[in-house]
Image: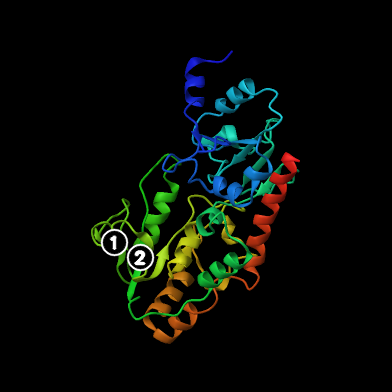
Amino acid sequence: MLKYDQIKQWRRALISSNGQVQYFNFWDKQTADEIWFTGFLKSRGFFDRFPHANFAFFSTLGSVQLLRVDELLHPFGRNRKRVFFTGENVHYQVFKDYEKNLLDYPSIDLSLGFDYVDDARYLRFPIWILEMFPPNSNINDIKRICSLLSFRKLEDSRNRFCALVAGTSTMLGTESLEMRKRMVEKLNLIDRVDCAGKLLRNTEELQERFHDDKAEFLKLYRFFICPENISVAGYVTEKVFHAIGSGCIPIYNGSLNNPEPEVLNHHAILFWERGGDNTFLLQQTEQLHNHHKLFKDFFEQPRLKDNAWEIVAAYFAILEQKLNNLLR
């Protein structure tokens, strides 16, 4: 039996202006028209080709019961397609209802996440794609963005050592906070680490001078501390890509220190070992920081693999194909 509060929550879904896309348990800082998937569907002509189709997208930021409500309210909706997407690590206890990427629910037509799952209804589609590539990107756009990410020239203005921009939330535990504190503690022995987020904040410059524009703030820095909250195979968020996009050398931990091996040039990343003494990394960082030519050579090497654009373009193409197949 449906509960009133569940129906009430279901009715709070974000709805696109054309009424064909609804979002449940998604982030609330965007309208439905601003969410990446609406832009993707629109730019690929789905609304023109399938005027009677409607999509219900589900994510992890709320109760899984909203899916059950949707199943009951749309039991025979042939044109209603349900898609699950997560940018979160569903293997945290707090997301236990989503651990199987909702593939344990037959009503889910397509599931998108970071795991490697062999299922016809599943596509690995990590959140960094949404962050780095606009939904209407064509192949030329993808090539251009990959080139901009990959190739950087060292500017004289990039003369500060290292930055951290991190929050203090303990919703996912304290392990990641302690790791970041340890990284700052060790790197501070080389030179000052500027912490502009809530964690260990020692500068207000990000807020007062750059008005919370992290990308502009990071253009001043050589290195950026950007580990994932947890190291799980395949779990790669936007963190390392934000570092690369801002031009910093990432000091990273995540995805068992094998993040996106078909896309990222691992020689351009400094990898922190969880639980290790990281002596080699610290020595390497100090050498790079104190020797201009060493740093320039390291900084200006390609950040992405030569065929990275092909991998990203394939993600776009396969997603479009799978959505097309749902509606045919």
Query: Which three-letter amino acid code belongs to the residue tagged 2?
Result: Glu
Which residue is most to the top? Answer: 1
Given residues 275 and 309, the one toward you in this image is 309
Label 2 secondary element: helix
Given residues 313 and 18, the one toward you in this image is 18
Given residues 66 and 96, the one toward you in this image is 66
On screen, 229 above or below 308? above
Q: Residue at x 38, y 78 (%)?
A: 289
Question: For the residue carrying disc 1, how many other residues have a C-alpha within 10 Å: few (<14), some (14-19), or many (20+)?
Answer: some
Disc on the earlier residue, 1 or 2: 1
For the residues labelled 1 and 2, say whether their Cβ atoms are less than 8 Å apart.
Answer: yes
On screen, 228 above or below 250? above
Query: Which three-letter amino acid code belongs to the residue tagged 1?
Result: Phe
Q: Position of residue 166 (x, y in %)?
A: 37, 53
Q: Residue at x 38, y 43 (%)?
A: 169
Residue 66 in view in this figure: yes
Q: Is residue 186 left or right of residue 309?
A: left
Q: Which mark is residue 216?
A: 2
Question: For the residue carrying disc 2, how many other residues have a C-alpha within 10 Å: few (<14), some (14-19), or many (20+)?
Answer: few
The residue wearing badge 1 is 210
Q: Is residue 143 left or right of residue 276?
A: right
Label 1 secondary element: loop
